[in-house]
Image (cartoon, rainbow, N blue to C red):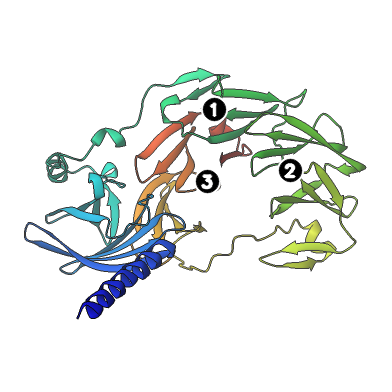
Amino acid sequence: MKKLFFMLIILFILYLGIQFAFHWFSDGQENEYKIKNDNNIFEVKEISNFDNNSYLYEIKINETNFSFQIFNDYNKDYKVLVDIFYYKDANYECFLPVFKDEKTFTDVMCMNNGHLVYYHNLNDENVDNFVDSIKIYDKNKFIDATDSETKEGINIYKNNLIDKHYIGITNYKGFYNVNKSFNSIVHNISLFGKDIYNQKLGIFVDNYYVVADYNEKNTFNKINVINLITLKSSTIVSDKSISFDSYIQGIVYHKLYLYDKDNNIQYEIDPSKESIIKLSNEIKYYDGQWSTMSVKEAKEEKMFITNKIDYENSEYVKIDQTDSYYYLYKKNGNKYDCYRINKQNQLGLIYLFSTQSIDLINYVNNYVYFVDDNKIKVFNDTFGIKNIIEYKELEFNKNIKFYVYAD
């Protein structure tokens, strides 16, 4: 009898060990459970990915389904959604997910015309009353700072800057570097002795700004490289002069490709190694894999395709993608409304913001930087929309580039 008892104890310990090992070494889990709140029952499907600390949720209450995703390191824990504040009237059906330790990672989400919209984008007295009744909800997180300070001729909303985000904005003689990591939040990097309205041969690659030396005329053989993090600058020198009648074809694997139309030469430039290589007679082209293009195509400025989209919908004028989401842009008067949907289940269409330009968009982790009028703004689920930079040239010069690198 004792042997049987000890054998059961050993088997139980082995079972616990296997369960622990499975959980600890797993890269994610899928769990289904229910959350009861007053008279409401929410059916929850939780899909966790421990590699990127994400939790994707599919929620059902009565006939309503909605989906959202959060990012937080819960140390491989699961069933971390513990409550949902809920409200419904004739116009809106609203939800605030609450996680372990009474944490919230999104604003209140409300169903409107078949898609979700965040509370900070709404104006409804009844929803206001519901939100005011939630004691753990912090409205202040979603209120934009109004105070700014002028540095180097641009206005900076210093309190809204994100730690370890380095922002580059081109100006007529070089570019601005904006971040919280230095004693001064704005550095005006001057590269040229004259005004350059369009730095066509300039591009941001990882944590570098790479630009032809516009101090030269007709042709150049020097390329400026400036590190956004350290502000250190260096020069790449080409053995052969390159015509200013060139264009940047694209970036592949941290290298940029430039085609000299006058001399029929393609170059590969690696800013991290400060190198430039003249490629062979065949002109390389990249659209997910390497192939070649004709001289005619190269001279017509055929650009590389490096971000193929497998989500198609003619309702939208532009579709971008990140690791987790599709960002969908719909024309609305003189602006574009941005919606987001999760790539994994293609559920949870949610309205995020409106912008006048769909060309000046930067996706950095789960932050979206965009231009609206003469301001650069940032969106994130945890705080909504915040002003970052006000720069009047954004209204007048469509050749301005801006870029954000996260260290």
SS at mark 2? loop
Q: Which residue is mark 1?
A: 181
**Of labels 3 and 1, the one closer to you:** 1
Please give the label number shown on residue 361: 3
Residue placed at 46% from the left, 31% from the top? 161
Q: Is residue 191 left or right of residue 86?
A: right
Q: Is residue 175 above or below residue 23?
A: above
CA separation, marks 2 and 3?
A: 24 Å
Q: Disc 1 or 2, which lies upstream in sequence?
A: 1
Q: Amino acid at mark 3?
A: Ile
- Number of residues whose C-alpha sits closer than 10 Å to that of mark 2, classed few (under 14), some (14–19) or many (20 or more): some
Viewer-closest of 89 and 73: 73
Q: Position of residue 353 (x, y in %)?
A: 38, 46
Q: Disc 2 or 3, which lies upstream in sequence?
A: 2
Q: Which residue is mark 2?
A: 272
Q: Is residue 90 above or below residue 207?
A: below
Q: Disc 3 or 1, which lies upstream in sequence?
A: 1
